[in-house]
Image (cartoon, rainbow, N blue to C red):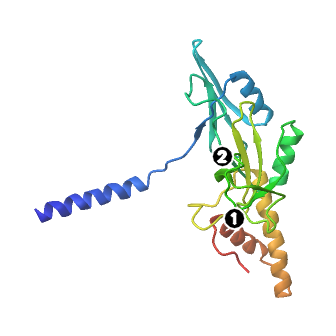
């Protein structure tokens, strides 16, 4: 009996181990809208990639858009979801340069809030567009820390989007090979590495002939949340 239990436990462990090796890629968020064509025009205005516009008869239509550099897409349409139009909240768009992302949407004629950071010691629930209802404080986070500076906008139905600026990930947030979602993302990482390397050379008092090795280490550790080179 004991042998049978051990074998069953071993089999279960193998099954769990195997399950953990299967990639589970989060790729779709459903956005509830009231006017499909109006929503399509808005997300086109954002400059997002139109992946599909598929209709089946007169009662079903689905449209898919993907933000630039994103591995996740949105879908909306007719008879796609029973959720109330405008009820999607806390939709985060992660950017490495918040000011640039905001300026791009403004140039496209999209209304975007001023940059703000959260008053983490005051969760009053008075400011719904910001996750957890934390009050907004004007301007970016004073320390320009990752995860703490935001800007927001809404689609015509009131579905609420947030830009969140992240330049350095917390430990454990990135698994596997280092990768960059876009040319702009890579450029931002190179610029941060260059600035940090300049301070490194100031500290050492000499030029670093192997700067590319230092850049590579810095960029990988920045993205994976490991301690940065000095």
Q: Is 2 left, or right, of 76 in this rendering?
A: left
Please identify the residue farthest to the right as the structure is shown.
107
Q: Residue at x 85, y 85 (%)?
A: 206
The quarter of the picture where residue 213 lies is bottom right
The front one of 217 and 150 is 150
Q: Residue 167's x, y, as percent?
A: 73, 62
Q: Residue 109's x, y, as percent?
A: 87, 36
Q: Residue at x 69, y 67 (%)?
A: 222
Residue 121 disc label: 1
Q: What element does badge 1 sit on?
A: loop
Q: What element does badge 2 sit on?
A: loop
Question: What's the CA distance linking mark 2 and mark 1?
Answer: 20 Å
Instruction: Say whether residue 173 is visible.
Output: yes
Label 1: few (<14), some (14–19) or many (≥20) C-alpha neighbours in 10 Å:
few
Whichever of callouts 2 and 1 sits on the residue coming sooner in the sequence is: 2
Please identify the residue farthest to the bottom as the structure is shown.
205
Q: Quadrant of the N terminus?
A: bottom left
- Residue under numbered circle 2: 90
Q: Residue 115's x, y, as percent?
A: 82, 53
Q: Residue at x 60, y 68 (%)?
A: 171
The quarter of the picture where residue 34 lies is top right
Label 2: few (<14), some (14–19) or many (≥20) C-alpha neighbours in 10 Å:
some
């Amino acid at each position: 009996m004991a042998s049978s239990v051990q074998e069953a436990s071993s089999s279960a462990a193998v099954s769990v181990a195997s399950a953990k090796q299967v990639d589970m890629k989060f790729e779709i968020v459903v956005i509830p809208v009231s006017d499909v064509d109006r929503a399509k025009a808005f997300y086109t205005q954002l400059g997002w990639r139109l992946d599909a516009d598929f209709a089946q008869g007169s009662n079903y239509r689905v449209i898919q858009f993907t933000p630039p550099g994103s591995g996740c897409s949105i879908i909306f349409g007719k008879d796609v979801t029973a959720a109330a139009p405008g009820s999607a909240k806390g939709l985060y768009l992660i950017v490495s340069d918040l000011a640039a992302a905001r300026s791009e949407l403004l140039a496209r004629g999209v209304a975007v809030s001023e940059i703000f950071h959260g008053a983490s010691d005051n969760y009053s629930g008075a400011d719904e567009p910001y996750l957890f209802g934390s009050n907004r404080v004007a301007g970016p986070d004073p320390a320009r820390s990752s995860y703490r500076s935001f800007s927001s906008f809404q689609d015509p139905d009131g579905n609420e989007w947030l830009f969140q600026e992240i330049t350095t990930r917390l430990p454990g947030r990135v698994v596997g090979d280092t990768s960059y979602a876009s040319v702009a993302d890579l450029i931002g990482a190179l610029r941060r590495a260059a600035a940090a390397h300049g301070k490194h050379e100031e500290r050492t008092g000499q030029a670093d002939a192997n700067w590319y090795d230092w850049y590579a280490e810095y960029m990988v550790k920045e993205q994976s949340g490991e301690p940065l080179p000095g």
